Image: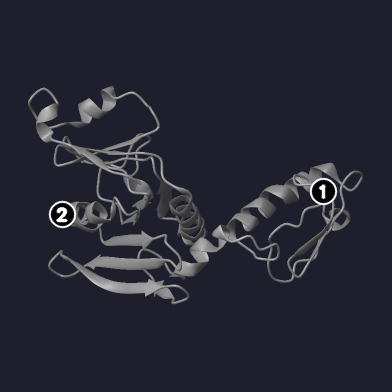
Amino acid sequence: MTVMSADPGVAAGRPFTVDDLEAIPHDGYRYELLDGMLIVTPAPGWYHQECSAELLGQLRNACTLEFRVLAAPFSVRTSERNELQPDILVARYADLTPKNLPVAPVMAVEVLSSSTALNDLNNKKAAYERMGTPSYWVLDPEPPGRLTVFELDSRSRYVQVANVSGDEKFTTDRPFPITIIPARLLDGLQFKSAKFTHSGAHYLGFCLPWLRRRGTKDTQMTRVNGQCDGQDPLFGDRALPLESRFMDSAASLPPG
């Protein structure tokens, strides 16, 4: 992504406020405020989106009942001159409003690009620290992938607690138990017919109810050791990327 920052004095000789953001038309860009400075970010690239989407799925699967995991665009609005939209945030359910998060998130995640790295690692990191966000994750989506984790210490200052890349694991219980392997967040960048990805699990969750409703008259589907035989309901006879031993067919599914 590319970041373009406007000087605070552009908005009628004063810093930008959240009211100014409300007046900006929706044009596909992400608009954020950092101490009255407007940050404009164009649509992200494939690596960014692949990494972000996969992490979002893993976090939502691990999330406990008291929290919610949301993806941008969703605003963290803590003052009239500060409104950020982290790529991913974790918030307490009780803190959320239908429009935004008016307090610090429990965790914020930013996915880097060459043009946003300085901002994400400095200005935004300082902003999340000031607002009291307990955990701040920074993901580098360039293969083999890298995750850097900062957490507030006893002085409410960020300290780096992890810096893992590739197949290295990061395990934490903040804000809930989860293990992240950076390289697995980028598996979708490779075309492997027998490789399971999180998106494959989502597809399967969508597909099985469809099969239960449709029955076996038009569709038979069997999966063994990551392979898909027969007719796939959405993609024809192309193999779906699935992993582990899964064997099922429409004939054996109970009615839904």
The residue lying furthest to the right in this view is 217
Q: List the residue tagged with mark 2.
A: 130
Residue 110 image-quadrant placement: bottom left
Secondary structure beneath dot 2 equals helix
Give the residue displayed 15% in from the left and 54% down from the top. Answer: 130
Relative image position of residue 10 (x, y in whole percent): 13, 28
Q: Residues within 10 Å of mark 1 (few under 14, many from 20)?
A: few
Upstream in sequence: badge 1 or badge 2:
2
Instruction: Left or right? Give the position of 190 relative to 55.
Output: right
Residue 24 image-quadrant placement: top left
Residue 256 can be seen in this image: no
Instruction: Left or right? Give the position of 104 relative to 164.
Output: left
- Identify which amino acid the numbered label 2 is placed on: Arg
Give the residue displayed 46% in from the left and 54% down from the top. Answer: 47
Instruction: Left or right? Give the position of 163 relative to 78.
Output: right
- Identify which amino acid the numbered label 1 is placed on: Pro
Residue 247 can be seen in this image: yes
Q: Residues within 10 Å of mark 2 (few under 14, many from 20)?
A: few
Relative image position of residue 71 (x, y in whole percent): 42, 47
Secondary structure beneath dot 1 equals loop
20 over 254 or under it: above or below: above
Relative image position of residue 159 (x, y in whole percent): 21, 70
Find residue 156 and name its label.
none
> Is disc 1 in contact with disc 2, using a CB cutoff of under 8 Å?
no
Measured Cα–Cα span from mark 1 to mark 2: 53 Å
